[in-house]
């Protein structure tokens, strides 16, 4: 393919490898530190309580209370190949040498000291903060690093350009295998500045919202950073969403501009993006400009709002003064589903989000300078924000942008990419792993995966079969596999097996341990915390942390109602969890009517809303658990949507045509991935309580074929409908099996 994609991003150079200049500089810094300690002939453990101040500063002359080796070198590989180097490089110089348990304890008992000292040292500030936090969780008041000013793009670009301008920042793994493009920190800064200047020239100012509807690409990353540079607020919309879904998000954010591409390329196919944007902006009066980048050479009609992005950038300066931003000013908003039909614009702010993304990136994945970090998420999801863009770039990492699919051109794509790019950390979704394990192991084994050091999973529970395959086949049983639990609202990983004490066990398919500052609490139905182990409950977090969302854009009441009202004094995650006998956490799934499709969150109400407006049908969709292995329904490993469709009693209705129409409807109104796998259109009465509430639990059990255990049905208005539904489901299954 003959691309016109930003010509100034085209450079072919060798990727910096382990032992690169920059890596040595950082390692040397660590050694010097240890040497300095040794020169004093003592290695210190300090009386911590006496040396830290609330604003994060600390006194250098400290009380020596005992001797303890400072951990500055890679630790021995444990039984499962875990380097577990969680203290190298240090969180901050004054926390060097602390163990995970000590650090965790400090982070929850004295968050001011913990976060204050780290924020001060790890972020570059225009103006230092004078208060570490001011939070009142019941009212959803969350403020960190007050009085401080910084610029996120400076922390992700300029600070690294100053030290190692030619280090590779991005490796764009394009859809076409073997055509990767490498972008250095200097080039990314220049591109970002040109784009930032283009936005400013067209009237985008601090505080304005900008929608980004682009595939994973250097120009997409530059668009995010350009917004950050000038203080505009980006809202990235996954480039698979329909025009209606895009319009809804643009309207909610009241965006002044949209940045898009003519087309996307995925799995060898071209996907038109500009026409989708055209259809969306027709209904978005706030949009003044649409900036159009060229991913392919195919022409796209340009209208009066449209500005060819590369052309506009070419005449702009490659320097742009960064806007100093208050810690709590908005960095971005990202829409995610709730239990109503209207997606929520989750707001993240500057300093706390960036610090949390960077810290989790380093410690959960055991990232080291010089590593090539491969998170294959799209920038349209929060995982792309935190672990493709902000976390890795803040840490000066080389981060991979994966544009393709796990099976293009064949099921070896991920592992061929690992070999070719020398990826050290590979972070993906269980849904892709489940897809890949169906193929011959040779698709993995034929590629050299010796560069891999950590594997990660996110988005939904990873079942045992997928975990074992990922760990044993991909990781050859030598790379720690971290099942990371977190959400759009949490900003970064909250529960994961790492960091942990040296050599600590990793239990398969469990998120396990809270990250620094995260205090998980399990609640019983009436809102009482559940103590002890081997218990299950609603997963809450007991105190604020810097990475958490600050509000829902334009609707703080909804924010408070959704997250802080259900369990006063706690953040409610919406998930259920089990605390094992050993005290480890396992996520058991959503507790509300939010479902998880291939790792993407979707409210059942959103699917239901689609149909009501159109066909005046009521669809009630549910996830249920199925197996990827035929006939093993008892082996839970994935969730698929199941729509129960109530039709008007009209014998002329053709059920097949209705299903076809509904499928198209959901794809148009939301996205293709949201289309339910199952449509059962034979039921005429849904199970309702006497107060008229549909008992979704019963439908879910029917879909899961667990009708022997329906629980209490005494509150049903007409309990006889249950037998009807079970019968209809059996007919549906039999018909479906005949057709497949
Ligand atoms: P999102 O905000 O779209 O990233 O979705 C967050 C939701 O995905 C969580 O509330 C969980 O329901 C689910 N989730 C994410 N990671 C995991 C995980 N490691 N294990 C289980 N569920 C997960």
Image: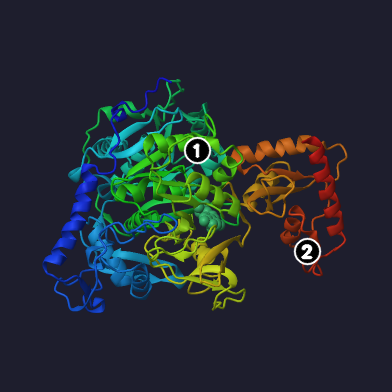
Residue labelled with disc 1:
445
Density class for disc 1 (Cα within 10 Å; few <14, some 14-19, many ≥20) is some
Please tell me which of labels 2 and 1 falls first in the chain.
1
Q: Report which quarter residue 577 is drawn in.
A: bottom right
On the question of residue 446 being in view, the answer is: yes
Residue 641 location, x and y as percent? 67, 48
Residue 319 location, x and y as percent? 21, 38
What residue lies at 38% left-to-right and 30% top-to-bottom? Answer: 180
Up-down: is 608 above or below 288?
A: below
**Nearest to the observer: residue 372 or residue 358:** 372
Query: Which of the image's four quarters has the N terminus?
Result: top left
What residue lies at 71% left-to-right and 55% top-to-bottom? Answer: 634
What residue lies at 54% left-to-right and 67% top-to-bottom? Answer: 539
Up-down: is 64 above or below 678?
A: below
On the question of residue 289 being in view, the answer is: no
Residue 342 location, x and y as percent? 57, 52
Left or right: 335 with respect to 605? left
Residue 406 location, x and y as percent? 52, 37
Left or right: 577 with respect to 449? right
Q: Secondary structure at mark 1?
A: helix
Q: Does label 1 point to a residue whose CB lies under 8 Å from ligand 1? A: no
């Amino acid at each position: 393919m003959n691309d016109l994609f930003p010509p100034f991003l085209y450079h072919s150079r060798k990727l910096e490898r382990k032992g690169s200049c920059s890596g040595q500089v950082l390692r040397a810094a660590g050694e010097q530190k240890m040497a300095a300690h040794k020169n004093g002939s003592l290695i210190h453990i300090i009386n911590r309580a006496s040396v830290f101040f609330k604003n994060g500063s600390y006194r250098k002359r400290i009380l020596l209370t005992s001797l303890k080796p400072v951990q500055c070198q890679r630790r021995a590989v444990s039984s499962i190949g875990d380097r577990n180097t969680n203290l190298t490089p240090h969180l901050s110089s004054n926390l060097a040498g602390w163990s995970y348990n000590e650090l965790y304890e400090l982070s929850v008992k004295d968050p001011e000291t913990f976060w204050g000292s780290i924020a001060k040292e790890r972020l570059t500030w225009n103006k230092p903060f004078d208060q570490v936090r001011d939070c009142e969780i019941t009212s959803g008041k969350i403020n960190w690093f007050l009085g401080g000013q910084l610029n996120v793009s400076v922390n992700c670009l300029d600070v690294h350009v100053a030290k190692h301008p030619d280090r590779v920042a991005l490796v764009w793994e394009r859809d076409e295998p073997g055509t990767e493009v490498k972008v250095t920190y200097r080039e990314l800064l220049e591109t970002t500045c040109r784009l930032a200047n283009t936005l400013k020239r067209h009237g985008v100012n601090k505080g304005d919202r900008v929608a980004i509807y682009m595939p994973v690409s250097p120009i997409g990353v530059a668009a995010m950073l350009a917004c950050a540079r000038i203080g505009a607020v980006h809202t990235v919309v996954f480039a698979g969403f329909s025009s209606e879904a895009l319009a809804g998000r643009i309207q909610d954010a009241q965006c002044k501009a949209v940045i898009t591409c003519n087309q996307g390329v995925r799995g060898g196919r071209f996907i038109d993006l500009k026409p989708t944007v055209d259809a969306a902006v027709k209904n978005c009066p706030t949009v003044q400009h649409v900036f159009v980048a060229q991913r392919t050479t195919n022409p796209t009609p340009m209208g009066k709002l449209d500005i060819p992005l590369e052309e506009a950038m070419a005449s702009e300066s490659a320097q742009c003064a960064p806007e100093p931003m208050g810690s709590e000013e908005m960095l971005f908003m990202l829409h995610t589903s709730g239990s109503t039909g209207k997606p929520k614009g989750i707001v993240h702010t500057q300093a706390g989000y960036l610090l949390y993304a960077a810290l989790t990136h380093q410690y959960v994945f055991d990232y080291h300078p010089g590593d090539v970090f491969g998170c294959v998420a799209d920038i349209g999801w929060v995982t792309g924000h935190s672990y493709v863009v902000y976390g890795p770039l803040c840490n000066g990492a080389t981060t991979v942008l994966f544009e393709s699919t796990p099976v293009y051109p064949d099921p070896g794509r991920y592992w061929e990419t690992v070999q070719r790019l020398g990826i050290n950390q590979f972070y993906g979704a269980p849904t892709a792993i489940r897809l890949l394990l169906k193929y011959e192991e040779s698709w993995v084994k034929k590629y050299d995966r010796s560069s891999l050091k950590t594997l990660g999973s996110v988005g939904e529970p990873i079942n045992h079969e997928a975990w074992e395959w990922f760990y044993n086949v991909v990781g050859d049983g030598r790379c720690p596999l971290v099942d990371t639990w977190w959400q759009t609202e949490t900003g970064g990983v909250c529960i994961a097996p790492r960091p942990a004490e040296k050599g600590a066990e990793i239990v398969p398919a469990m998120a396990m341990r809270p990250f620094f500052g995260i205090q998980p609490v399990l609640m019983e139905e009436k809102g009482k915390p559940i103590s002890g182990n081997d218990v299950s409950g609603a997963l809450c977090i007991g105190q604020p942390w810097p990475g958490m969302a600050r509000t829902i854009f334009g609707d703080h009441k909804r924010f408070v109602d959704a997250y802080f009202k259900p369990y006063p004094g706690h953040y409610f995650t919406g998930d259920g969890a089990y605390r094992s006998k050993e005290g480890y956490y396992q996520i058991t799934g959503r507790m509300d009517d939010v479902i998880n499709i291939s790792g993407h969150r979707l409210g059942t109400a959103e699917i239901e809303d689609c149909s009501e407006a159109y066909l005046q049908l009521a669809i009630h969709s549910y996830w249920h658990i199925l197996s990827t292995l035929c006939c093993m329904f008892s082996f839970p490993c994935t969730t698929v949507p199941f729509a129960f469709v109530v039709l008007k009693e009209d014998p002329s209705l053709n059920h097949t045509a209705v299903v076809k129409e509904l499928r198209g409807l959901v794809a148009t109104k939301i996205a293709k991935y949201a289309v339910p796998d199952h449509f059962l259109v034979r039921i005429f009465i849904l199970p309702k309580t006497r107060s008229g509430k549909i008992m979704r639990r019963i439908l879910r059990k029917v879909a899961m074929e667990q009708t022997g255990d329906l629980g209490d049905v005494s509150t049903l208005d007409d309990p006889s409908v249950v037998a009807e539904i079970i019968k209809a489901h059996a007919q549906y299954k039999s018909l479906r099996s005949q057709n497949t």
